[in-house]
Amino acid sequence: MNSQHGEEAEVQLSKHDARLILSRLITTPVAPGSYSYLINAGTDAILEALQKNYFNGQLAEGISCFKFVEGDYGTGKTQFINSLARRGMDDNIVVAIVSIGQECSCHHLERMTRSTPTRALKF
């Protein structure tokens, strides 16, 4: 069972997808990409607040928004942002995730903007 949007929902996964998630969790210390929302824990209140205020509030009124997530390595940034992105897509919102780092520095906004379409999140 998976708690998504405060409701219990049964998730159907193929054996291949289940093995892929398990393999990623065991072999790498990174969130399992588009499957992150299936194992998300501890951030539902924040996700629900963002969904209410931005997805169902500002964006529904035609007001765009930008969110920046910062934190130390291994603190769950990728897990959180993938879970938020999934909620956005479930609400028919266009979502893009841009990783800012050495190759895409926030000090080079033009380079960061150009990289956005090629880094769009796909589910």
Image: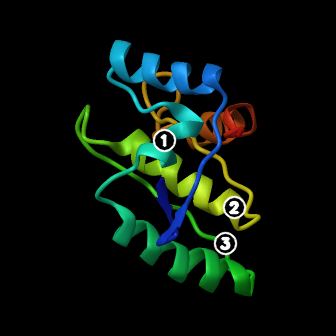
Q: How many marks?
A: 3
- Give the CA separation, mark 1 to mark 2: 14 Å
Horizontal and vertical percent for residue 93? 73, 63
Task: Name the residue tied to disc 3.
Answer: 64
In the visual, does 121 lie left or right of 109? Answer: right
Color style of the picture: rainbow
- Comparing 10 with 37, the one in front is 10
Amino acid at the residue labelled 1: Ser
- Give the CA separation, mark 2 to mark 3: 17 Å
Q: Residue at x 70, y 68 (%)?
A: 91
Quarter of image, res 88: bottom right
Q: Residue at x 43, y 77 (%)?
A: 49
- Give the CA separation, mark 3 to mark 1: 25 Å
Task: Name the residue tied to disc 1.
Answer: 36
Q: Residues within 10 Å of mark 3 (few under 14, many from 20)?
A: few
Task: Name the residue tied to disc 2.
Answer: 90
Q: Residue at x 67, y 33 (%)?
A: 119
Q: Residue at x 48, y 30 (%)?
A: 32
In the visual, does 28 lie left or right of 58? Answer: left
Residue 69 sits above or below residue 59 on the image: above
Residue 22 sits above or below residue 11 on the image: above
Amino acid at the residue labelled 2: Asp
- Is disc 2 placed on a helix, strand or loop? helix
Residue 21 sits above or below residue 78 on the image: above
Horizontal and vertical percent for residue 109? 57, 43
